[in-house]
Amino acid sequence: MSLSTSLPRDQEARPPSRVREITQLTLAHLINDIYAPVLMALQPLLITTLGYSYSQAALLPVMHSLISSALQPIFGSLADRRGFRVSVALSVLLSGCGIAFLGLLSDHYLIMLGSIAVAAVGAATFHPGALCKVAAIAVSSNRGRLTSFFIVGGNLGQALGPILGGIVITTGGLSAVTWLLIPALLAALLLAVRPIPDICPVAARQTESSGSESWMPVLLLFAGSILRSWVTFGAMTFLPTYLVLSGYPLIEATFLISTMLLAGVAGQLTGGYLSDRMGRKPVSVATTFFSIPAFAAILLTQGSLQIAAMLSFGFFLWASFSVTIAMAHELMPSRIGLISGLFMGIAMGAGGIGVSVSGVIADHFGLTATLSVFPALILATTLLFAVVGYPRRG
C-alpha cells in the first residue's frame, strides 16, 4: 500500500477554506484544553477555603484525566467503525460546562464529580473528532504542518488554563468560575455558524477495502510516544524542584520551565514543517535523539549553558509530537479516530503513570537519580521510532 493511494489524494481542486478550517479547529483545541488545567488552580481554594481534604481536591483532576484518557480511543473506534461522532462544537461546550458549573456546585461534592465527568466526556470526544477533521483536511504535502498547528493550539490552552483560572478565582472566588463558560459558548457558536464538513468517513471508505494496513509500526510509534510522554511530564514535574535545589529562586525556576515549554511549541511547529519537506521518520528520529544530549547538559551544566540546554531540550523533544501523530494517521488512515484517541488519550495518561514511577525512584534514590533515567527513556524512544516501517519520501 502506498501512502498516495491510502489517503485522500492531493487534489488540485481542494476548497480554499482549508486555512479557515484549520484555524477554527486550532482555536477550538485551545479553548477545549483550557479547562482541565483550571482544576489545578482550584486546588488551594478547595482545600483552604472550602474545607475539602487533599485527597478530595486531588480526585477532581485525577478523575478528569482518567475518564478522558480511557474514553478517547473508545469514541475514536466508534467513529471509525460505526460513524458515531460528537460534533466538535458540542465537545467544546461539554468541556466548558463541566468545569464552569463547578462554581455553582461547591457545596455538593458528588455533583461536582459528576460535572467533572461531563467535562471529561467533552475532552474525550473532542480530540478524536477534531483530529479526524485535521487528517481529512490535510494532504501529504502539508499534513505535518497542519497537525502541528492543531496540537500547538492545545499546548497554548494548557498553558493559559492555570493563568485564566487563577485570575478568575482571585477576582471573584469559586463562583466566578462560571464565567469560564463564555469561551466555550463563543467557540461552539463559531463552529455552529461556520461548520466544518464531516468529511472523515470519506477517508475511511477510501481505505477500508485495501486491507493492507499494519498495526505493528503504529504500535511502535505508540510505545515510543508513551515513553516520550513519561519524559515530558517527568521533566515538567521534577525539573522545577531540581532547579530550586540547584540554587534558583522558585519564581525563576518556574519561569525557566515556561520558557522550555514555549521552546517546545516552536519545536512542534518546526518539526511539522520539516517533516513535510524532509520526511516524517527522519525528523522524528533525529529530533528525539538530539534531545538526549540536551537533557544531559541540563544535569551537567549551570548558568547560561543550563538555560540553553533547557531550551534545546524543549525544542527537540516536543518537535516529534505532532509528527508521530501524522505518521500514525498515514499508516492507518481507516482508523483515524482510534489512532487519535490512543495517542492523545492513552499515551498521555500512561506517561503520567510513568511519572509516579519516577517519584518512587526519587523517594528511594534521590531526585538526580530519577532525572538520570530520562536520557535512557529518550534513547529507547529514538530506537522505537527508528525501527518503524514507514515508506520513504518519493
Image: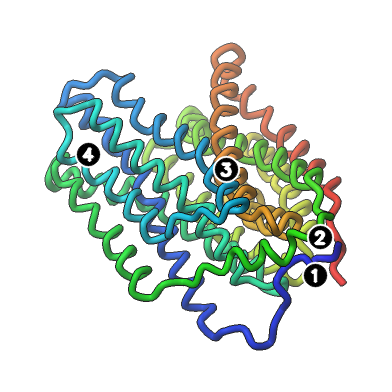
Locate residue 327, reporting x and y percent.
72, 57
Q: For marks 1 and 2, give the one nearer the viewer.
A: 2
Q: Is residue 363 left or right of residue 372?
A: left
Label 4: state its secondary structure.
helix
The reply to whether the C-beta atoms of the residues labelled 3 and 2 are less than 8 Å apart is: no
Q: Which residue is mark 2?
A: 210
Locate residue 62, reporting x and y percent.
41, 30
- Nearer the N terminus, badge 1 or badge 2? 1
Amino acid on which the number 1 mark rests in the picture: Thr
- Nearer the N terminus, badge 4 or badge 1? 1
Q: Which residue is mark 3?
A: 73
Q: Report the front residue among 52 and 181.
A: 181
Amino acid on which the number 2 mark rests in the picture: Ser
Q: Which residue is mark 4?
A: 102
Residue 44 visible in rendering: yes
Q: What residue do we see at 51% from left, 50% from top? A: 261
Q: Between marks 3 and 1, how big is the CA–CA gap?
A: 25 Å
Amino acid on which the number 3 mark rests in the picture: Pro
Q: Which residue is mark 1?
A: 5
Amino acid on which the number 4 mark rests in the picture: Leu
Q: What residue do we see at 61% from left, 43% from top? A: 342
Q: What residue do we see at 16% from left, 26% from top? A: 50
The reply to whether the C-beta atoms of the residues labelled 1 and 2 are less than 8 Å apart is: yes
